Amino acid sequence: MASIQTVKGFRDFFPEECALRNYIFDTWRAVARRYGFVEYEGPVLESTDLFRKKSGDEITSQLFCFTTKGEDDVSLRPEVTPSLARMATARQRDFKKPMKWFQIGSCFRYEAPQEGRTREFVQFNADILGDASPATDAELIALAIDTVREFGVSTEDFAIRLSNREIWNTYLSEKNIPAEHTSTFLQIIDKIERAKPEDTENKLAAIGLSLTDVRAFMASADENHPAFAALRENLTARGLWQQVRIDATIVRGLAYYTGTVFEVFDLKHGLRAVAGGGRYDKLCSLMSDGKVDMPAAGFAMGDVVLGILLKKTPGAQMKLTSALLASSSIDAYVVVADEAQRGNALAAVQTLRAAGVRVDYSFGAQKVGKQFQAAEDRKARFAITFGTEYPEVVIKNLLARSQSTVPVDGLVAEVQRLLAEPALGPLIA
Amino acid sequence: MASIQTVKGFRDFFPEECALRNYIFDTWRAVARRYGFVEYEGPVLESTDLFRKKSGDEITSQLFCFTTKGEDDVSLRPEVTPSLARMATARQRDFKKPMKWFQIGSCFRYEAPQEGRTREFVQFNADILGDASPATDAELIALAIDTVREFGVSTEDFAIRLSNREIWNTYLSEKNIPAEHTSTFLQIIDKIERAKPEDTENKLAAIGLSLTDVRAFMASADENHPAFAALRENLTARGLWQQVRIDATIVRGLAYYTGTVFEVFDLKHGLRAVAGGGRYDKLCSLMSDGKVDMPAAGFAMGDVVLGILLKKTPGAQMKLTSALLASSSIDAYVVVADEAQRGNALAAVQTLRAAGVRVDYSFGAQKVGKQFQAAEDRKARFAITFGTEYPEVVIKNLLARSQSTVPVDGLVAEVQRLLAEPALGPLIA
């Protein structure tokens, strides 16, 4: 049998990639908690009907969908919002409003893999349910901004593209365009930056509009538009409004947005959107067959584009490097210089670990030099040598190159004291 | 369309269940790092051939397997070891030996759901590759013991059942039983505690053995058996050997174990095994078609049985409760007593969060009493009131019921100072 490969579009996380992934997850979680969000998680496998209900039958072309041995039609989730709507509407009476919920987990889409797009990716979803005010939209945009900044991406490196679906609804109604053309129109706007102007012109003409007029309207939709007034006041008070660019071309592909829509995008590398979201006031009602009518808004940020951005952005690289070092290093390496002391060394390893110290050691007899090399390889801060001096043991600071001798009974206390000092030790060693 | 349910055997993690899950993951991760393990992760979807290669064609009856739109035969992973073997053998030259690797992630098995068994569950896998010595087995058993203890499960509440496949190999060879009967024999032993004695008797007779003789041999396999000598010496040095019970009925279902095998089981509630593992020296060679011959050992611990055990064990409940409280509470709730101060309050919310303080507030105008109630509901430690006193703000300790007034410029420093104090504040408030 030939050697078996990772499934196309899926990822192996070797320790270094796993540390990057954990750093991203930890940062998402820390900022969301600071904002008072609580974490939930849905199943990665759902009834295919759940996704059809939200997005229509066409969605199945993008799904990893299959029939189980029990004849259930199921799919790996392509996004988390349908699960959130299912969960929140089923038990909404149990939770105070507004519900500020976040989630971190894998999603799956059967699309052609390319830069910034894998078939498996992790999303950070933050949603607020049960509050229809612009203050909710502002809270979400502020969270998106602070999340990106927390990674060390500076305010010069990214921006929020902001729009509001209502702007276009008003425009279409003023032009007396029938409601059945709305989704066609929004699809044209969604592609207006990439499509050929003559194609756009023709498509707009087919529904009774002109490109010149649409462009003029887009240019007029600036930050003074009343649709943005409350949001602007709120984000200005937080000192975050300068991060926002009004951009009426932002409609977000998904059909279900009803008001504010926004994207986070980088300003230097032309990457895909880092995050996107908006208000979707009708979804809970749709997903609960009208039983629960609850306003909602939220955004999703993926790990793939974000990961690329962090590696390309100098300020973010520094934070990333120190996080990766912290997760791969250990506190102490126990060196067994005299095999007669192995039992005592094991006892000390046990005691140190019980005190929360990260410790490694060699499983078998090895030359002392090789054990010190292993300590360096593991990026240990201290080497603790068990040799003929026992019950005295030698603690060597591998960064400061200083060392001291302590009785084994005082080892744990001394290691804890040393770990509480700055990593390079006292200036005069 | 009828309301859509969670897929059978899958789980919704509402905030409380998600907090339990995160507490379990965080604890697994902390103890593994203390032991010097580094984290990796594989994809949840793998080629079905990967699982066939390890376990044979019969495994597919337990798999969530399907064919993708691209005609790939894939499965949701039922366990992580095949992915580990695939990854480790593909890149083993890049890593120093022994490789001490751990992983935390979902697995999926198409089995009948029952107490302690769901179709989706999370495993903590800890494996050591590249070292064949009993010191490796001891390190893994110590890690399993310390992981369970870290949750507050006392040494009276659980034990390690230990055996070694070699014991039975020696026995079968002394009885001149042909090698082709080995797996049949191990299956009989695996079920010996639950099967009717007369059935076991008949099955043993069919391969030339008697139940009386097997039972006598089992009773003789105590901790003095040479197969356990090195492990015993090692775990005794760590003070952990008293946690171990020799039990020759432990063979572990999976066919691939080659030496030490063990299970973690609770002593009070008769639950399924909390964890299980052992040595599997031939698997890397099998999975790499003989290209990489690397000894290995490891164990897996699931979240479902462990979660039940934590809820049933008093010492574990206390740690669990305080972890759940810590993850659901916030540090401060900002009360807007005068709507004219909303902008200043939002600015303070932003500054506090930027300093790492977990803050929530009401999105719209509400009576002060209702805002204080929301602060209590969110388990905030402090309420910070923005009212007519501005630029002075009032900080109230909601546990100690004490309060103080500070100028808004000193707010962040004062909140940080207060948060560093014990949660109940000074004894005389």
Image: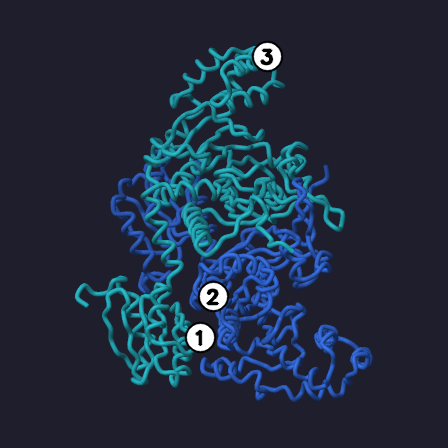
Chain colours: A blue, B cyan
Considering the numbered disc 2 on the image, is that residue within a helix, a strand or a loop? strand
Tell me where residue B75 appears, x and y as whole percent.
65, 44
Q: Are marks 1 and 2 on the same chain?
A: no
**Which of pointers 3 and 2 indicates the residue nearer the eye?**
2
Q: Residues within 10 Å of mark 3 (few under 14, many from 20)?
A: few
Query: Which residue in the structure is indicated by mark 3?
Result: B206
Mark 3 element type: helix
Instruction: Give the position of the C terminus of chain A as an image quadrant.
Output: bottom left
Among numbered discs 3 and 1, the one appearing first in the sequence: 3
Write the residue at 60% across / 60% down.
A289
- Residue sitting at x 34%, y 56%: A419
Whole-percent x and y of residue B189?
Answer: 51, 21
Q: Quadrant of the N terminus of chain A?
A: top right
Q: As drawn, is A339 to the left or to the right of B184?
A: left
Residue B85, x across and y down, in percent? 60, 41
Determine whether A122 is above or below A135 in the image. Answer: above
Residue type at mark 2? Lys
- The residue under label 2 is A100
Observer-nearest residue: B1 or A135? B1
Query: Nearer the viewer's eye, disc 3 or disc 1?
Result: 1
Q: Work out how far the residue at label 3 is from the one at label 2, CA to CA, in angstroms.
A: 64 Å
Task: For mark 1, name the chain.
Answer: B
